[in-house]
Amino acid sequence: MYTSSWHRAKTPLILSLIAMTLFGLSSCQSFRTGSGYNFESKYSLKKRKTHISCTAERGDPAVIKPLPLKVSEQTFDRLFSSIDELLGTTYRNGGNTPDGFDCSGFVQYLYKQQFRMILPRTTGELALLGIVVPENNLKRGDLVFFSIDGNNIDHVGIITGRNRFTHAARSGVRVDELFEPYYRARYAFGERIITPE
C-alpha cells in the first residue's frame, strides 16, 4: 500500500520531468535552426542568380550584368552617405520610398538609386542573389539575412561597418550590432551582390 501511493505520487513528477526535457530539447533545436549554420549551407547549395538587370542611362534598355556587380569607389561610398541620410525613416509595411520602408524595400531602393540594380522585391528573393559569404568575411555593402520566425528568411540589412548593419526595423531605419544577442540568435547568412572596383 505504501509503495503504491509512493508510485502514484512519483508518476506525475516523472512525466513533468520528461515533458520539460522534451520541451527544452525542441527549444534548443529550433534556436539552432535560426542561428545561421543550416541556412548558410542551404542557401549556398540553392540555385543562385548570377546576373542582375540594371537600368541604363537616358532611357536605354536595361542591361544584364554579372554578380557581384563591380561598382566605382565613388558610387560605393555614396551608398553609405545615402544610408546615413535615411536613418530614422519610419517603417512602413511594403514601403520602398523615403516616405517609409520595410526591410527589403530599403535595400531595393538604395541599390537602385546608387547602382541602377533592379532587385527583386521580397527578402526571400533577395536571398538568392550573388554569392553566399561566410560571416568572418563580411564587408561593407554585403547583405545580411535573418530568420526572425526561425523557419524562413524574413529580414535583411546592409553591412555598414565592422559587425554593424543598417536595416528598416519596426522602429524605423537604424544601425544595430550584428552579433548582439537578438540578432546573433536569428542570423542566417550574408551575401555579396556588389564589390568596389
Image: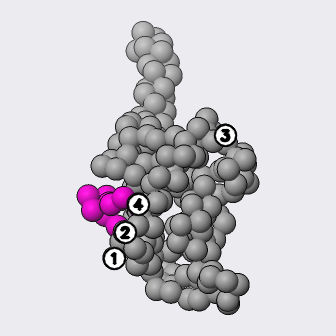
Marks 2 and 1: CB-CB under 8 Å? yes
Which residue carries the number 4 mark?
77
Q: Amino acid at mark 4?
A: Asp
- Mark 2 or mark 1: whose residue is earlier in sequence: 2
Q: Which mark is residue 102?
A: none
| Residue at disc 1, secondary structure | loop
Rounded to the nearest whole Å, what is the CA distance between mark 3 and mark 2?
Answer: 29 Å
Q: Is residue 51 above or below residue 37?
A: below
Marks 4 and 2: CB-CB under 8 Å? yes
Mark 2 Cα shell of 10 Å, populated few (<14), some (14-19), many (≥20): few
- Mark 3 or mark 4: whose residue is earlier in sequence: 4
| Residue at disc 2, secondary structure | helix
Stretch of the chain drawn in magenta? 133-141
Q: Nearer the viewer, residue 98 or 173?
A: 98
Which residue carries the number 3 mark?
90
> Given the current orientation, which residue lies at the most extreme left position?
136
Q: Amino acid at mark 2?
A: Glu
Q: Position of residue 16 (x, y in %)?
A: 48, 26
Rounded to the nearest whole Å, what is the CA distance between mark 1 and mark 4?
Answer: 12 Å
| Residue at disc 4, secondary structure | helix
Rounded to the nearest whole Å, what is the CA distance between mark 3 and mark 4?
Answer: 24 Å
Which residue carries the number 2 mark?
73
In this image, 2 relative to 103: left or right? left
- Mark 3 or mark 2: whose residue is earlier in sequence: 2
| Residue at disc 3, secondary structure | loop
Q: Amino acid at mark 3?
A: Thr
Mark 3 Cα shell of 10 Å, populated few (<14), some (14-19), many (≥20): some
Q: Position of residue 74 (x, y in %)?
A: 40, 67
Is residue 133 visible in this depiction of the protein? yes
- Which quarter shows the C terminus? bottom left
Which residue carries the number 1 mark?
197
